[in-house]
Amino acid sequence: MATAVRISEELANAAKKYSRIEHRSITGQIEHWAKVGKCAEENPDLTYSLIKEILMGLEELEHGEKSEYRFG
């Protein structure tokens, strides 16, 4: 269910710029930032790179793109 929220013009303009770079919609860019920020608040010791990899892995699992990890 979509919910309308008000954001500052500054944030909207930043999202517009980054959405073009990342090939996302403006809404998708803001949702991405929200997911990363939520994960960062819940796990303050994780780096941005690790958070991004975790989110990518979760997305892959959700779409059935998984494979067994082999040690060694």
Image (spheres, rainbow, N blue to C red):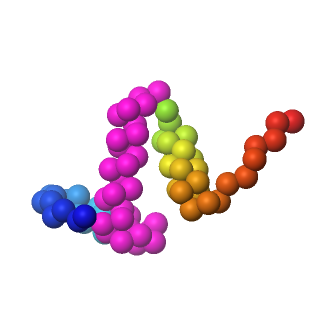
Give me the residue at 31% from left, 68% from top. Answer: 26
Give me the residue at 49% from left, 32% from top. Answer: 46
Above or below, comparing residue 21 to residue 51 in the picture:
below
Tell me: 36 left or right of 27: right
Q: Which segment is the magenta one?
A: 18-45
Tell me: 40 left or right of 51: left
* Residue 64 location (% of width, % of height): 62, 60
* Residue 2 location (% of width, % of height): 23, 65
In this view of the protein, can residue 66 be seen by the observer? yes
Q: Quadrant of the N terminus?
A: bottom left
Above or below, comparing residue 9 to residue 55 in the picture:
below
Answer whether residue 3 is magenta in the image.
Answer: no
Give me the residue at 82% from left, 36% from top. Answer: 71
In this view of the protein, can residue 56 be seen by the observer? no
Quarter of the image where one finds residue 72: top right
The residue closer to the viewer here, 16 or 3, is 3
Taken as a whole, is the magenta stretch helix, strand or loop?
helix
Quarter of the image where one finds residue 24: bottom left
Total numbered labels: 0
